Image (cartoon, rainbow, N blue to C red):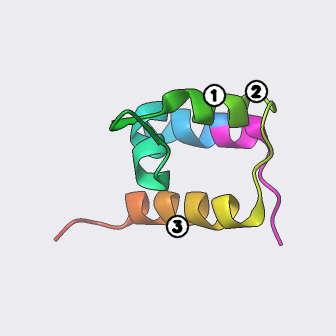
Amino acid sequence: MDIITGKDLQLARANAGITQKQLAEYLGYMSNGQPNASMIARFENDHAKINSRVRIAIQHFFREQEEPVI
């Protein structure tokens, strides 16, 4: 099982050119119908733990970003 730290997430997101808002929307973190980027910031600053469900979803998200769009 791979562990993703907040810094790992921040670097991967920045290197992929993905915003906190985009990742929050994919993960389903919403507030008043809008993506809750503050939850991603909490992960990146180690104020919230990245559990196994979230880790798998994050890995899936980044794999999707690498696949060419046909």
Q: Amino acid at mark 3?
A: His
Q: Nearer the viewer, residue 38 or 7?
A: 38
Stretch in magenta: 1-9
In the displayed image of the protein, which residue is found farthest to the front? 32
The secondary structure type at the circle numbered 2 is loop
Which mark, by number, is residue 41? 1
Residue ID at (37%, 33%): 32
The quadrant in which the N terminus is found is bottom right
Q: CA distance from mark 3 to mark 2?
A: 21 Å
The residue singled out by tag 2 in the image is: 45
Looking at marks 3 and 1 on the same chain, the residue that comes earlier in the sequence is marked by: 1
Vertical order, 36 against 9 (above or below): above
Q: Earlier in the sequence, mark 3 or mark 2?
A: 2
> Residue flagged by tag 2: what amino acid is it?
Asn
| Residue 26 coordinates in the image, percent (x, y) | 42, 53
Within 10 Å of disc 3 (Cα), the crowding (few <14, some 14-19, many 20+) is: few
Q: Residue furthest left?
A: 70
Q: Is residue 31 above or below residue 60?
A: above
Left or right, 3 with reference to 13: right
Contact between labelled residues 1 and 3, with CB atoms less than 8 Å apart: no
Contact (Cβ within 8 Å) of mark 2 with mark 1: yes
Question: What residue did someone put label 3 on?
Answer: 60
Quadrant in which the C terminus is drawn? bottom left
Q: Is residue 19 visible?
A: no
Residue positioned 49% across, 53% down in the render: 27
Badge nearest the viewer, 3 or 1: 1
Q: Could you say whether the residue bearing mark 1 is in a helix, strand or loop? A: helix
